[in-house]
Image: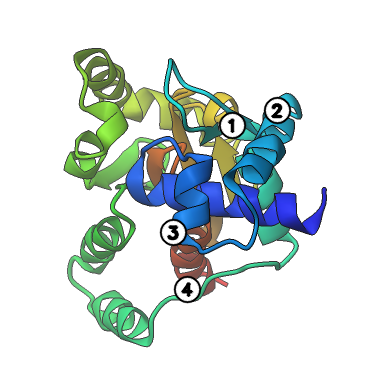
Amino acid sequence: MSDRKKFLLETIVKEYIKTAQPVSSGMLVSKYKLDISPATVRNEMMELEEEGYIHQPHTSSGRVPTEATYELLIGELKEGKNRKRLKESEVKLLEQIFKQEEMAYKQTAKAIAEFSGSAVFWAFHKNDLYYTGLSNLFAQPEFRETAAVCDVSGVIDRMEDIIDTMFEEFNDGLQILVGSNNPFGNFLSAVIVKYKNNNQDGVFGILGPVRMDYGRNLALIEFIKEKFE
């Protein structure tokens, strides 16, 4: 992939994560003051669509990323490219919360749900599950329609069963499960860490739309991972 097409693809992802709206060539040129014409950008976007990285939803003039694009960018994150760091103030707050003995885990989960704008679950071992931030899922633009609300509600109703079933199957360490590869449903993604604490397994995860900010959520999950290393 050429550098220009890679830049366009990364920019489309950035905009779509931020707005949940299809991204048009004209918007890219005007907002980012690109030194190429909208026609050139359209041609590049057509090629990206043919290659399976973006698609046109309904009759919109804009395009949105596909799972293949997220998998591509996640692969780079795993290689250490374009990694994000938490703000110093966020790390300080999480450290303060985590050091508290009483209710530290629940309060840490609530803080990470707020920072990520997603739902968070924490399974300390099988059949011992805590989750929070569910309202964040329903606040996402793609989950406001009735059918989507039903889909998300169904996942919440089955959350314990899903995690009980998958608990032993989750690999140790960090995992990013996108859309169709995610046991919670193909309309969601999850960033997960499985760890050991006092010889017992635990699983911590951030659950959000496929459109989630994987780089930021990975940085949040790494905070948890480091606490159990």
Are circles 2 and 1 on residues that touch, CB within 8 Å?
Answer: yes
Amino acid type at circle 4 is Lys
Q: Is residue 147 above or below residue 143?
A: above
Nearer-the-camera pick, 115 or 140: 140
Nearer-the-camera pick, 111 or 106: 111
> Alpha carbon of mark 3 to alpha carbon of mark 1: how far?
22 Å
Amino acid type at circle 1 is Thr
On screen, residue 130 versus residue 69, left or right, reads left
Residue at far right of view: 1
- For numbered disc 4, what is the local secondary structure? helix
> Alpha carbon of mark 3 to alpha carbon of mark 4: how far?
41 Å
Which residue is tagged 2?
52
Amino acid type at circle 3 is Lys
| Mark whose residue sits in front, 3 or 1 | 3
Instruction: Report crowding for label 3: few under 14, some 14 to 19, many 20 or more residues within 10 A (C-alpha).
Output: few
- For numbered disc 1, what is the local secondary structure? loop
Which residue is tagged 4?
227
Residue 150: quadrant of the picture = top left
Of the numbered discs 3 and 1, the one sitting upstream in the chain is 3
